Amino acid sequence: MSKVAVKKKVEVEVEVEETGTVLSDVKVYARKIWLAGLGAYAKAGQEGAEYFKELVKNGEGVEKQGKKLVNEQVEAANSQIDSVKATVTSNVTSVKGKVEVQLDKIEKAFDNRVASALNRMGIPSKQDVAALSAKLDELSALLEQVARTK
């Protein structure tokens, strides 16, 4: 019987030793995992700052390109606006000149018709009054000469 008890005692000791080594292995691996996490965090922090700087630099480049593109499009739109403005201005000037000519013709025709109607009624025109006034001035001048000579 003593042999059986010794065997059981040896088996228990082996199990304790195996459990102890597994536990220490787990502790070692847990520590390594912890350290790996810390290393990853530190590396991500360091590379993250560099990556952030690179992203900012790339963003500045894209911003410059965007501003350049917008400025080119604004300039193109302004040149088109100037071209259309010049065309419209020349068209307006041309139409304005034609309208003024037509208005002058209409005004002259109206004046002639009114003068003709007034003349038929016996009302003297401006030219008739001006002619009579000139004749009166001549007669007045002649009368003054005659009065001086007497």
Image (cartoon, rainbow, N blue to C red):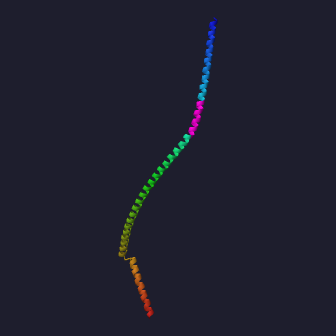
Q: Is residue 102 above or below residue 122?
A: above
Q: Is residue 50 above or below residue 16?
A: below
Location of the C terminus by quadrant is bottom left
Residue 126 place in picture, x, y as percent = 40, 77
Within the magenta stretch, is there residue 39? Answer: yes
Residue 108 found in image quarter: bottom left
Give whichever of 115, 107 is nearer the camera.
Answer: 107
Toward the bottom, the furthest residue is 150
Identify the residue at horizontal 58%, vertical 30% (top origin): 36
Within the magenta stretch, is there residue 101? Answer: no
Residue 14 place in picture, x, y as percent = 61, 15
Location of the N terminus by quadrant is top right
Give whichever of 60, 74 is nearer the camera.
Answer: 60
Identify the residue at horizontal 62%, vertical 13% (top origin): 12
Q: Which residues are magenta?
A: 35-49
Residue 131 place in picture, x, y as percent = 39, 81
Q: Is residue 37 above or below residue 8?
A: below
Task: Indicate left or right for 124 with 7 as reference.
Answer: left
